[in-house]
Amino acid sequence: MHTANVWTVFWVALGTALATGLGALPFVIIRNFSRKWLGIFNAAAAGLMLGASVGLINQGVLVNLGLLTVGTIGGLFLIIFLNNRLKQNHEAHHQLFHSTGGLRGFLIVGVMTIHSFAEGIGIGVAYGGNVALGALIAVAIAIHNIPEGLAISLVMVPRGTSPVKASLWSVFSSLPQPLMAVPAYLFVLIFHPFLPLGLGLAAGAMLWMVFSELVPEALQDTDHNTVGIVVTLALAAMIALQVLIQPF
């Protein structure tokens, strides 16, 4: 039974977006923040999102394996297409470069904004499955958003952007989450037989983010051993949490 409503889904997704702004908080105290911590945070986010993807896939398998598979492949190619389109069109947005810390700043904000569409769909679809799964996905994405905000701030603050402005740009990059969560939630409520398709779509996009973005970025900022340990512990924690919360 679905006990969540549209407003619950919206406010939860908005909360995950606001969590992105927390990534700028270290720069209120320290202007030069060690990138090693960004690597650790990205590794933790990778483990949590990997566990969340497993939860989405498990939920979809119980309903329809074929639709889940189609959705997973579709989510993979959709996020790749959007990511490539963004990088190809960045030259048309020179006016934003100075306010976002140059080309690198614009690209990182843009890429994370594209990712946020998939994350918003993930939240909405998960709540369409059941409230416990929705809550777990939202927590994983909220924690994942903090290092995203930190990554944005690491690019912008050293180039003269204030921590407050960097925080606002970070939140802006995640605004698609509440905007996409509600339509995705309503879609799976109305077209419930297509729930596995939506779960697969979200899982495919999130898995691509884990292995194409989060893990490689973590490896750039800290050593392989630390990344492996943090990813494994975060994955185990998320799976354990899913098992504990599922009966409720």
Image (cartoon, rainbow, N blue to C red):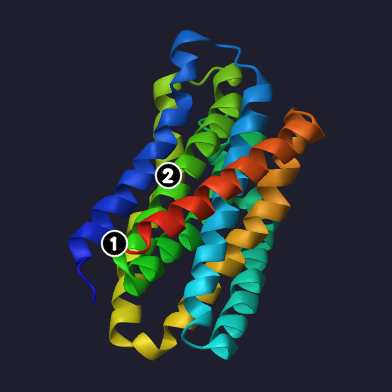
Q: Nearer the viewer, residue 134 or 201?
A: 134
- Mark 1 and mark 2 lie on one chain; the one further toward the N terminus is 2
SS class, disc 2: helix
Q: Position of residue 76 (x, y in %)?
A: 65, 70
Instruction: Tell me which residue sits at (60%, 55%) in the image.
Output: 50
Residue 113 seen in this snapshot: no
Q: Judge whether 175 appears above or below 207 on screen.
A: above
Question: Residue sitting at 43 percent across and 66 percent down?
Answer: 121
What is the crowding at mark 2: few (fewer than 14 residues within 10 Å), some, or many (at least 20)? many
Q: Say which amino acid is labelled 2.
A: Ala
Q: Residues within 10 Å of mark 1 (few under 14, many from 20)?
A: few
Horizontally, residue 173 falls left or right of residue 68, namely: left
Residue at image mark 1: 248
Q: Position of residue 144 (x, y in %)?
A: 51, 43
At x 45% / y 64%, what residue is drawn?
122
Element marked by disc 1:
loop
Distance of label 1 from label 2 (alpha carbons) = 21 Å
How many numbered badges does the structure rendering display?
Answer: 2
Foreground: disc 1 or disc 2: 1
179 displayed left or right of 214: left
Q: Is residue 130 above or below residue 165?
A: below
Q: Nearer the viewer, residue 180 or 200?
A: 200
Percent position of residue 140, x then y: 46, 49
Residue on which the image places disc 2: 142
In percent of width and height, residue 231 lies at 66, 43
Residue 79: name its quadrant: bottom right
Location of residue 243 (image quadrant) = bottom left
